Amino acid sequence: MLIGKPGAARTAISAASSDRVTVRGRDLATDLMGSVSFTDYVFLLATGRAPTEEQRFFLDLSLVALAEHGLTPSVQAARMTYDADPAALQGAIAAGVLGCGSVILGAADLCRKLIEDVLARAGAGKALDAAALDVARSYRERRAPLPGYGHPLHKPVDPRAERMIALARERGVAGRSVEAALALKEAAARVWGKPLPMNVSMTIAATLRDAGVPPGLIRAIPILARTAGLIAHCIEESETPIGFLMASKAEEAIYHAADEVA
């Protein structure tokens, strides 16, 4: 049974032969190696074209902002998996990447969709602040967290988010997406009755969207960024291991009802 659309299988990304590798119509060895940065190359792979100066800048900025954030759950998973099999670095990195989800690290795409919801309502005749307020209220009524707002550690502001907004304004990139993100920040404070810091996931979505970065890359950039941090943690784990210690501390913290004596 054939699953999917019928037709010839094809890819436009790359082809390799005995004497050459072609990537998006460019010769890898002569046109790309030594001529483009990794960020340029990622954009080319994903879109088939070179990034603009601002797309390159804000992609780089996003990668730097998200590569590292301490001993997060994804990092702990990677380090403990590395200790289980030090020969399988790829397994440890994969374990960490699998820990990147909508709650931690992977919210940029949800934030992009939230921005687009606000802008769609504003495009239908509502003022931007009123549209943002409607969206915030809809989340509050469902008792759902508002993607991109609030942070367990960074209060009252996320310093990464503040820096990204400042650079977007400074470089003239801040547009309707950033405006929508800021309107949502004000709306969230009204609806929740307290300030909710705009976090880096929202500013990544807003600045990349205003820079014209495609949705697929906005979704993927956090994973690509954190992979670099996971590699660093696994290298450190090989030199000064703490994975088993973290596992033992977790075990100590668990309440074992079965150990109670009736």
Image: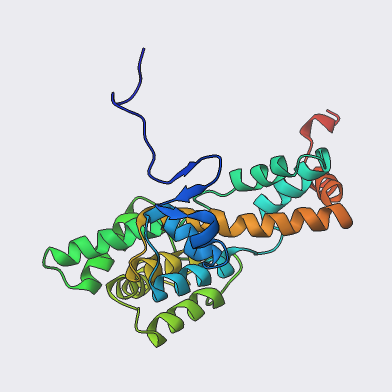
Q: Quarter of the image holding residue 236?
A: bottom right
Q: How is the image coloured?
A: rainbow
Q: Position of residue 97 (x, y in %)?
A: 61, 47
Q: Position of residue 62 (x, y in %)?
A: 51, 68
Q: Position of residue 61 (x, y in %)?
A: 52, 72
Residue found 52% across the figure and 77% down from its top: 157
Q: Quarter of the image holding residue 84?
A: top right
Residue found 33% across the figure and 56% down from its top: 113
The front one of 106 and 122 is 106
Can you name the residue that lies furthest to the bottom here?
Answer: 170
Horizontal side, residue 129 vs residue 235: left or right: left
Q: Position of residue 51 (x, y in %)?
A: 40, 67
Residue found 61% across the figure and 68% down from its top: 153
The answer to whether any part of residue 254 appears in the image is no
Can you name the residue that lies furthest to the top here?
Answer: 1
Where is the N terminus found, in terms of image quarters? top left
In this rendering, the answer to whether 24 lies above or below 115 is above
Residue found 47% across the figure and 67% down from its top: 59
In this rendering, the answer to whether 11 lies above or below 155 is above
Can you name the residue that lies furthest to the left here?
Answer: 125
The front one of 151 and 26 is 26
Horizontal side, residue 109 vs residue 117: left or right: right
Horizontal side, residue 54 vs residue 255: left or right: left
The answer to whether any part of residue 88 appears in the image is yes
In this rendering, the answer to whether 3 lies above or below 147 is above
The front one of 114 and 82 is 82
The front one of 16 and 137 is 16
